[in-house]
Amino acid sequence: MAHTEDFTERALRAVHTAAQALGAPETSAHGGPELIRMGERAVFRLRDGAVIARVERSAARWAEADREVRAARWLAEQGLPVSRPLPGEQPVLAEGTAVTLWEGVQGEWTVPRELAKLLHALHGLIPPPELDLPELDPFDRVAERIDTAPGLSSTQRDQLRQTHRDLAARFPTTTPVLGIHVIHGDANIGNVLATPNGVVLFDLDGICWGPPEWDLVLAALYRDLGWHSEAEYTDFCEAYRFDVTAWEGYPLYKQIRELRMTTWLAQKRGESAEIDAEIDRRISDLADPRRLREWNPY
């Protein structure tokens, strides 16, 4: 836990430096920056949510943060409702990290149908060459998470590595049917908010060239997990005009997404007994794709 605490302190200093560099006040009547999420990067709320700061774990992620800022500005120019970076040169390098500051989005969780509309619009855009989007890496950070997640047994790590190898070997054998387009990369309902002015899409750090099926599979997986209702998923498919579960590659993409969800959560071992039990349950379930999943969302 000391490592996390050290990063939190360093991230706070980095936010202070970035806010000064961009001329953005970081405090409000209720105090300074508030940590709202800690994962592969730290996310802080500034000025009662008027500004959101995202702090990467290291400066090695500067290129990804830079791409996210440039992509958001391009998408806003195209009329897609996305979270907007504050004006100025971003990312800001500080404390050995890369920091980006964004306009806060005040809203409520929305329904899968709204996500489908945004994805349909996004997938139809043609990004400028200078945006230099990478190709999809469906296993980005998976090996690192397996190696560094705290508290996993050697048996669990070996199982996750074997699952990773098996799925990586199978991935090139599946051919998407929707072509290659610009995709969000992590298109789940948690990355969309409904505001008085309409829905807003955010968390664009995974934007890349890839098959739209990669974005669509999460809504279907959430339906299978019971996190979306059948009616919500039907509305999603009608809005996008495609049902990814009818594609032969869906089971493989679903298993890759499950592996990613499991290794992401594995980084949070030790935060609570409930999370630890969920991690163990997910790792056990990965061994049998046919086993009924009773997973909890995090």
Image: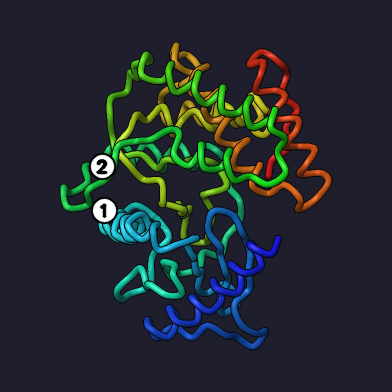
**65 versus 103 height, above or below:** above
Q: Is residue 233 or residue 157 the one in the foreground?
A: 157
- The quadrant of the picture occupied by the C terminus is top right
Q: Secondary structure at mark 2?
A: loop
Residue 226 location in percent, x, y?
Answer: 69, 29
- The quadrant of the picture occupied by the N terminus is bottom right
**220 versus 249 height, above or below:** below
Residue under the point 76% across and 44% down: 275
Q: Secondary structure at mark 1?
A: loop
Residue 18 numbered tag: none
Tell me the residue that label 1 is attached to.
78
The residue furthest front is: 154
The residue furthest bottom is: 29
Mark 1 burial class by Cα count in 10 Å: few <14, some 14-19, many 20+: some
Q: CA distance from mark 1 to mark 2?
A: 8 Å
The residue furthest left is: 129
Check contact, mark 1 vs mark 2: CB within 8 A.
yes
| Image-based side of 247 in relation to 88, left or right | right
According to the image, what is the colour scheme of the structure? rainbow
Residue 58 location in percent, x, y?
Answer: 45, 62
**134 versus 3 height, above or below:** above
Residue 247 location in percent, x, y?
Answer: 44, 14
| Image-based side of 242 in relation to 254, left or right | left
- Report whether residue 231 is seen: no
Q: Is residue 44 or residue 59 the one in the foreground?
A: 59
Tell me the residue that label 2 is attached to.
125
| Image-based side of 73 in relation to 148, left or right | left
Amino acid type of the residue tagged 2 in the rendering: Leu
Mark 2 burial class by Cα count in 10 Å: few <14, some 14-19, many 20+: some
**63 versus 168 height, above or below:** below
Residue under the point 22% across and 48% down: 132
